[in-house]
Amino acid sequence: MLDAGRLMTAESDSLSLFDHALNATLMLTYVASRGGDQVGLMTFADRVLTYLPPGPGKSASQRLIRSLFAVHPELVETDYEGAFTAIGPRLRKRSLVVLFTQILDHNAAQQLLRLTRGLLPRHLPLIVLLRDPSLEALVQISPNQFALTDHRPYITAAAAEMLSWRDRLIRDLKRAGALVLDILPRELSPGLINRYLEVKARQML
């Protein structure tokens, strides 16, 4: 499940978060298909954009790649409810459901948490949250670097609060039974493959 909403247009290392997720999706598709697993895809923003049912082998990878040519992130709010409602009835077998997204809003976080619980225990959700390096850099600034009239301490405090809120969301998702990959965009592809191989090795499906 590939989020193509507004927050996925943000850039990191000269690529949008959507493009980072797209590259990781293609890599995961290749590895999973070679390992004998079926792979499907949903892209969504304020509506479902594309859906390919799970299929085996090289043909599934080729169909998935073709379906992504015309998909781009849009400046609209992500509709998790619509996406989860659409995908749930279509997955007949227990599946690893990988969701690539970015969340900065309490209401969206609560909605995602509720919908993720709805996938369990029938499916195994893996929520991929992309970290913001610029946000993390803000909290590394030493207080000694600030002048008395500097506004940066307030910005640093806001960044720290956002990171703390994000940590709470991750803990809530894990307590609900989901897997979470909280990762920098540039590390996404290898990190995702390692998590997928871990799921396979531990026979979690």
Image (cartoon, grey):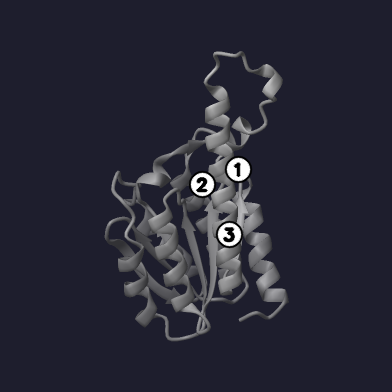
What kind of residue is marked 3?
Answer: Ile
Residue 96 in view here: yes
Horizontal and vertical percent for residue 23?
52, 50
Image vertical order of residue 32 relative to residue 11, above or below: below
Which residue is the site of mark 3? 170
Q: Who comes first in sequence, dot 3 or dot 2?
A: 2
Which residue is the site of mark 2? 20
Horizontal and vertical percent for residue 130?
54, 49
CB under 8 Å between discs 1 and 2: yes
Mark 1 to mark 2 CA distance (whole Å): 7 Å
Which residue is the site of mark 1? 186
Q: Who comes first in sequence, dot 1 or dot 2?
A: 2
What kind of residue is marked 2?
Answer: His
Image vertical order of residue 95 relative to residue 140, above or below: below
Q: Residue at the spot x=38%, y=57% of the render?
A: 107
Residue 63 in view here: no
Mark 3 to mark 1 CA distance (whole Å): 20 Å
Q: Residues within 10 Å of mark 1 (few under 14, many from 20)?
A: some
Element under label 3?
A: helix
